[in-house]
Image (cartoon, rainbow, N blue to C red):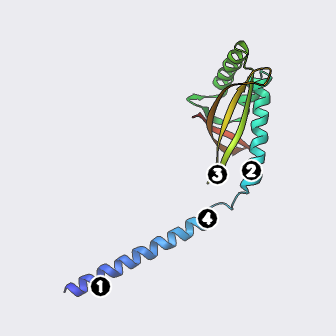
């Protein structure tokens, strides 16, 4: 009797393992094709440079355009809220002599429909001296043919 139970248990385990292998194969085959992260990194750096230019020019509306329709900056969500928050940041930066913002990507990875960008930022005075530094994490999502910010978090 014990031999039969052992055999049944072993057969069930083999069926479960085989089922898991098939599921893994389906998952791998159904994932989107690999993204060229070198090219994507260049595109994202261009987008970050445009974002910096918008900040440096005091254009909070252009900054808000970098976000998806449901994108967030920290806990701030919604186009009007993003415009207002970035407008306040720009005014604060100008009043305190740090009107320039610069980004440098340190890593990019892809996860399904999302890109994850991690990098460093600097605030700069008019004479380009660094006033402050920090790190950021941005999750990007393709919207209207462009990689827009879905989640933007300072670290």
N-terminal label among 2 and 3: 2
Disc number for residue 30: 4
- Callout 3: helix, strand or loop? strand
Determine which residue is flagged by label 1.
7
Q: Is residue 21 above or below residue 93?
A: below
Q: Position of residue 52 (x, y in %)?
A: 76, 30
Q: Gap in Å between the C-alphas at discs 3 and 4?
A: 19 Å
Q: Gap in Å between the C-alphas at discs 2 and 4?
A: 21 Å
| Residue at (52, 68) in percent of width and height | 24
Q: From the image, state whether disc 3 or disc 4 is nearer to you.
A: 3
- Picture quarter containing residue 80? top right
Disc number for residue 109: 3
Q: Residue furthest top?
A: 95
- Kindly tell me whether residue 145 is visible in this rendering: no
Along the line of sight, which residue is nearer the eye, 155 or 19? 155
Determine which residue is flagged by label 2.
40
């Amino acid at each position: 009797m014990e031999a039969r139970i052992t055999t049944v248990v072993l057969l069930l385990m083999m069926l479960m393992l085989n089922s898991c292998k098939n599921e893994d194969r389906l998952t791998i085959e159904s994932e989107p094709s690999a993204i060229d992260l070198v090219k994507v990194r260049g595109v994202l750096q261009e987008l970050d440079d445009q974002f910096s230019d918008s900040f440096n020019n005091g254009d909070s509306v252009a900054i808000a355009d970098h976000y998806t329709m449901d994108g967030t900056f920290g806990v701030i969500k919604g186009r009007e809220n993003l415009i207002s928050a970035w407008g306040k940041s720009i005014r604060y930066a100008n009043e305190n002599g740090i009107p320039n913002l610069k980004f440098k990507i340190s890593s990019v990875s892809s996860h399904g429909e999302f890109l994850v960008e991690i990098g460093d930022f600097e605030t700069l005075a008019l004479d380009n001296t660094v006033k402050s530094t920090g790190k950021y994490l941005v999750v990007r999502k393709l919207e209207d043919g462009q990689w827009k910010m879905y989640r933007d978090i300072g670290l």
